Structure formats: C-alpha cells, structure tokens
Image (cartoon, coloured by chain):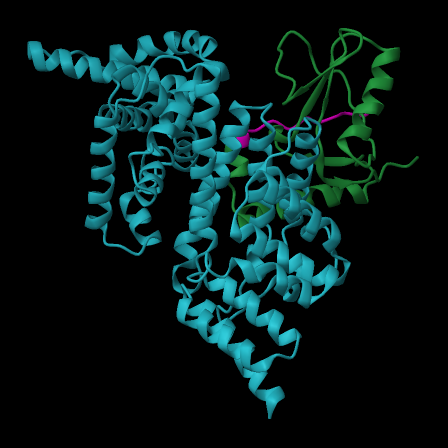
Chain colours: A cyan, B green
Amino acid sequence: MNDLAWIDAALTSARPQAVAALLRYFRDLDAAEEAFQDACLRALKSWPQNGPPRDPAAWLILVGRNVAIDAARRRRKQEPLPDDELLSDLEDAESDLADRLDNADYRDDILRLLFICCHPQVPATQQIALALRVVSGLTVKQIARAFLVSESAMEQRITRAKGRIAKANVAFATPGAPERAERLAAVAAMVYLIFNEGYSAAGDTADARAQLCDEAIRLARLLLRLFQTEPEIMGLTALLLLQHARTAARFDASGQIVLLEDQDRNLWNRALIDEGVALIDKAVRHRRPGPYQIQAAIAALHARSERPQDTDWAQIDLLYASLERLQPSPVVTLNRAVAVSKVRGPEAALTMIEPLAPQLSGYFHFFGVKGALLMQLERREEAREAFNRAIALANTATEAAHIRMHLDRLDQTAS
Amino acid sequence: MLYAILCYHSEDVVCAWSKEEDDAVMAKLNVVQEKLTRQGRLGPVARLMPTTAATTLRKDRDPPLVIDGPFAETKEQLLGFYIVDCESLEAALQVAADLAKVNPGGAYELRPVSVFHPSSLPS
C-alpha cells in the first residue's frame, strides 16, 4: 500500500473517535469537523515524513485541538505560531495521550456523536445523511448520489440537520446507565436504517447505495467494539453481516430481484455468514433475546440451509412468534405468515394475514404475499387483484417487474 | 525448528477491504503458501475472524470468568494456541475450561477461525 492509501485508510478509521472527542472539546459539530479536517491536512504533511503515529486517532485529536486553539489565539493576537515546533512537540505528547484514551474514554464520545446524528428532533432522512457525513466521512457528493438528490439539496439537508441539533442541546456530561442504553438503542436503529437504505436499492442506484451497507457494517462493528457485552449489538452486527452475505445473489444480470428461494446459494458470502453465526452464538449466551438477535437468528437459519428445501421453517415460525411478542407489528406478522405457509400451508397463512389488511393497505409486500398465497390456493381472480394492488404500490421498478412476472405466470396457466 | 508466524494488522483496515480486494490479497498469499506446501514445509494456516467475534476466558480465578471480547491485557504474552473443532461457542468454552482446570493462570481467547488450511508437514 502506498503512503496515500495507507493514510487515507487510517484517517477514515480514526474519524469517529477523533471527531467524537473533538466534539466533546468544542461542543460544536462544525468546529469539531473543521478541527478534524485541519488535523487531516497536517497528517498528510507529517505522516509520510515522520511515519505513522502509534495511535492515529489520538494524534488527530491532539493536533485538531491545538490547531484550533492556535487559530483562535492567532485571531486574537495576530501573531503566527511556528508550525513545525507544534508538530515536533506532538510526537511525545501523543503517546502519552494514547495511553489515557482507551476504548472506555472513546465510548461515550462516539456514542454521543452518533446519538446527536439520530436525535429525535432530526427527521430520519436527515439523520442518515448527517451520520454518513459526520461519522463516516462520506462526501456530500457521495451521499447525494446514494439518495438520488442534487449535491446542493443534500448540502442543505445536512445544514438543516445541524441547525436542529444545535438547538436540541444534547448533554455533554457522561451519561448514566439508562441514558446510555437509550442512546445505544437509538443509534442501533439508525445504523440499521442506513443499512436498509443500501440494501433496498436496486438497478442504477445499487452501486452508489451498496456503500451504505458497508458503512452500516463498519458502524455496527465499531459499536460492538465499544459495547462488547451487549447482545443486541452482537445481534445487529450479525443481522447486517448475514443479510449483506446474500448481496451478490439478490439481483440477476438484468437487475431483477431474485427471491431467497431462487437465489444461487454459491454466490452467498460464506465468510460473512460464518461471522454472523459466530456473533449469534456469542449473543445467545447472555439469554437476553432482543429483536436484532431474533432477526439475525432467522437470517442465520436461511443462510445455513444449503438448499431452499432444507430450510427449518418451523423454527423460523417460532422465532417470528417471539419477535411478534417482543415487537408486535403487522409487518412481523406478515413475515411470519410466509413461514406459516411453508409449515401449515397457504390457507393458514392467509387466515393469519387477513386481519392485517386495514393496517397494511398501503404496503407493497402485503399484496405481494397475499397474491402469492392466493395463487397457491388456485384463487386466480383474487390473486390477480392482489398483484395489481401490489404493482400500484411498488416502490421501485424492480419490485413492479417482479410482480408482473407472477401475473404473467397466472395468465399462462389460465390459458 | 518449527516457527509460528503471527499476523498483526489493523482490523479496521482489513475489514474495510471489499470482497475483490480481500480475494486479491488471499490469492497472492496462496501463491507463497503453495510453494511452501510443495516443499512440505507449511503447517496449518488459519485466518481468524475479527476480534468482535472473540470471547475471553480468564483462568486466573476459579471458576474461570467468561468475558465478551478479545484478550486485552498487555501484562501477559501469547505463549501458544490450539485449534479445536467445536459445535458451538459453548462447546469451545467447555474445552477451554477443561484446559484451564489443569493449567490455571492467565487467559484463553476464543476466536472463531474463518479460513483454515490443514498442515502439509510430514507427520
């Protein structure tokens, strides 16, 4: 790896720690980002000559802080400080600071930084954009591409989010245990949201959005390193890894969705699956099940089945049942119905989803599942009706195309 | 003399490799390994999962204490390792606890193996 590539990788991985610590110091997101940028510029100058620092994050924090203080001083006194002296002093101070800044110190800083991004006063779409910008360090251009908006619109979205946060007054004191747990839950939800933004993409935007999946996994791993004993964070990370493992098999060459049971399982990423399964194994020991762990366990059952017919649908049904208890939602019941249709047949599944109709009347997948069940029961007219509703509600052209395929099949068997 | 070569790198950086980048590195390493294998000089090769998948069993107390995460202390040094085939983490912890019973002190870090090539050394 050449200097630049190495430095770039080091700056990216140090970013959450460094920005988070600078935020605690300056208590202002813009000031923290600016200080980090300045520190990065110094790093590009200094690291190739002096070699990489032992702890890049500590180096960046210290330099970022000093450069900002220096700039403030300069504004007051109009007298420049010598740059090189500042940097040579740093090398000694850095190792000292690195000893004092271990994971525990970073933990609340990084959690605060992430929590600020997903503050309840900031709308979900702005949360994700802000986190990708501030925590992951993606450029506004990259984020704009992923969300299919112009750069200036994205810039505005991020600026607005920052404005809201400035008014929200997030506490800087070290959080207590309940507050920490609450922040962690909000942050986990945001990481999952980022992943889903990437995962649900198809066609032209798939490449730009695939990066969101990678970023979400990076953030989940970061959270897991900071909160090593949290089974739900293990579950979240496992869930993302297991879903991401199927990426290469989810779309065919023409960009059409390939359903789970039709996917080429040789294209699944075994390394990610094994890691996801290992994390679930760790989480289970805690005997504190939660929604992410259960969803990960369901994903693992799919991932470990060599052929679709090997899938343990009865176990999946049970897992969905516990998910329904922990987190009741019509969408969970809809998913459970798919498992039920495999175990107890389409009739039972249909009975299960019928009461969901009022709540899911605007939900694409409801009509997709309903149509498929009716088709299995040979109730063609009703199936056609459900599929037509699904097409009208499709979020992407790929989704619509997939349902149209079912309709064609209906027409063929009818004629 | 047999030598163990222990691999260290920044997990952040390696985990951020794309599948293609990762495959390319592994392919290049395989070329080097194959040469050693042909000479009958290569023992088992293992690539470990990230430290986030690790569990540590502190055996300096009885009963031993199981903690999530990698072995983080710097007072102790790496002195050896086992590769054991286990059905689950629970089973692996049982093996570690059995070992701990006859050799207390220090800790074992249990880390799932992601890639494993068996030994080509003459037995």
Closer to the camera in the image, B16 or B79: B16
- The kind of secondary structure the magenta stretch mainly shows is loop
User: Against A176, is A311 above or below?
Assistant: below
Query: Which image quadrant: the N terminus of chain B?
Result: top right
Could you tell me residue B116's position as x and y percent? 75, 40
Q: Is residue A167 visible?
A: yes
- Give left or right: position of A291 versus A18: right
User: Against B4, is A68 above or below?
Assistant: above
Could you tell me residue B80's position as x and y percent? 77, 19
Q: Which residues are magenta?
A: B1-11
Q: Is residue A102 visible?
A: no
Query: Which image quadrant: the C terminus of chain B?
Result: top right
User: Against A181, is A399 above or below?
Assistant: below
Q: Is residue B9 magenta?
A: yes
Closer to the camera in the image, A5 or B65: B65
Q: Quadrant of residue A62?
A: top left
Extreme residue toward the right, this view: B123
